[in-house]
Amino acid sequence: YHAIKKAHPGALLFFRMGDFYELFFEDAVAAAAALDIALTKRGKHEGFDIPMCGVPVHTAEGYLARLIRAGFKVAICEQTEEPSNRRKGPLARAVVRTVTAGTLTEEGLLDARRNNYLLGIAESGGQLGIAWLDLSTGAFALGPTSEAALAGDLARLRPGEILLPERLLA
């Protein structure tokens, strides 16, 4: 668990355990509050109780939608081996998908009335450019912009997520 979580900083880890996606530690505290579900505990780590919450796999899409709408990024960790092929110890697991507002493709998580763009902003040679992609439809476009036009471009496209280099945040 810890190695997988460390490899996905900033994401809540939906850790598959049988018929549930479980969240632990700080992820559990944040998710329980955002989803209004019970925060429990499971075992101890370094002498302290491990906070835990979980959602059933068969209803996970609804909970995932709520977390994404609340601004979270979620890494979905699945079992990568069958229990029947099990060696001693826990089943192998790996993150199979990271879900963010701009990477949604499931119909149940999308607003059918508008595109869900993942938009990137880049700067080169003092010029700004934007590119936008809707993963659910495959629509892709790009074009130049400027500091003065950027707010209007963002209002027109209404991206679900924006990617930009840190240097543009200053």
Image: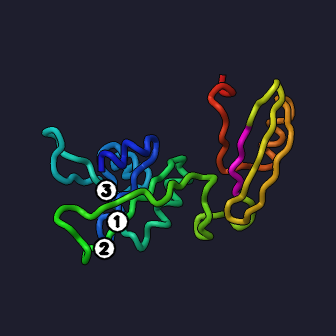
Based on the picture, tell me whether residue 109 belongs to the magenta stretch.
no
Q: In this view, does 95 lie above or below 155?
A: below
The three-letter amino acid code for the residue at tag 2 is Glu
Q: In this view, does 150 lie above or below 106?
A: above
The three-letter amino acid code for the residue at tag 1 is Gln
Left or right of residue 30, residue 109 in this image = right
User: Local crowd at mark 1 within 10 Å, few (<14), some, or many (≥20)?
Assistant: some
Label 2: which residue? Answer: 82
Label 3: which residue? Answer: 53
User: Local crowd at mark 2 within 10 Å, few (<14), some, or many (≥20)?
Assistant: few
User: Local crowd at mark 3 within 10 Å, few (<14), some, or many (≥20)?
Assistant: many
Identify the magenta region.
116-121
Secondary structure mostly seen in the magenta stretch: strand
| Circle 2/circle 3 CB separation < 8 Å | no
Quarter occupied by the C terminus: top right
Residue depicted at 23% across the width and 71% down the height = 86
Residue sitting nearer the eye, 94 or 85: 85
Left or right of residue 24, residue 74 in this image = right
Identify the element where label 3 is drawn: strand
| Circle 1/circle 2 CB separation < 8 Å | yes
